[in-house]
Amino acid sequence: MKKISRYFLMATVSLSMFAQNAFAADQTGVCKLISELEPVIRTLRILAFLGAAFVLMDWAWGFIKSGEVKKEDLKDKGIGMFVGFFLLFGVGLILTFVASTGGQSYLGCVKDAFAVTKA
């Protein structure tokens, strides 16, 4: 648990230190970064959702294979598995929002789905 909290603290500190650089003067840097990293965001999103599915599948298969569920098994294994599932699922949802049109417009990247141009 100490190791995970240390990683989380390190990620939070680095995000808070470097996030203002992305949103400094205008939003063109963030928009360009999102558009260029769109294939990577899609791949990470798919892997996050697949990872969440495999975490739950492993947890369920362990109980199906043993044939019985004890309270100690739920305390020892169940909480960690659910935390891992919700972390991976949350990352997938965040990446889905960032890649969507609504997320990009929230970040200042205006996208028109049906742009009408006047000739």
Image (tube, rainbow, N blue to C red):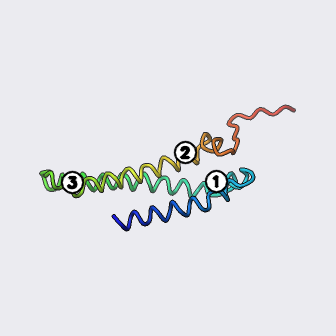
Query: Residue 99 or 87: which is nearer the viewer?
Result: 87
Question: What whole-number distance in Å separates the C-alpha atoms at marks 2 and 1?
Answer: 12 Å
| Label 2: which secondary element | helix
**Residue tagged by mark 3?**
75
| Label 3: which secondary element | helix
- x and y percentages locating residue 13 in the rendered image: 53, 62
Query: Residue 72 or 115: which is nearer the viewer?
Result: 72
- x and y percentages locating residue 14 in the rendered image: 55, 64
Mark 1 / mark 3, whichever is N-terminal: 1
Query: Callout 2, which amino acid?
Result: Phe
| Label 1: which secondary element | helix
Question: What whole-number distance in Å separates the C-alpha atoms at marks 1 and 3?
Answer: 40 Å
Viewer-nearest of discs 1 and 3: 3
The answer to whether the residues at label 1 and label 3 have Cβ atoms under 8 Å apart is: no
Question: What whole-number distance in Å separates the C-alpha atoms at marks 2 and 3?
Answer: 33 Å
Query: Callout 3, which amino acid?
Result: Lys
Q: Residue at x 34, y 55 (%)?
A: 54
Neighbor class of circle 3 (other Cα within 10 Å; few <14, some 14-19, many 20+) is: few
Query: Residue 37 or 85: which is nearer the viewer?
Result: 85
- x and y percentages locating residue 45 in the rendered image: 49, 53
Viewer-nearest of discs 2 and 3: 3
**What mark, if any, has residue 56 been given in the picture?**
none
Query: Callout 1, which amino acid?
Result: Ile
**Residue tagged by mark 2?**
97
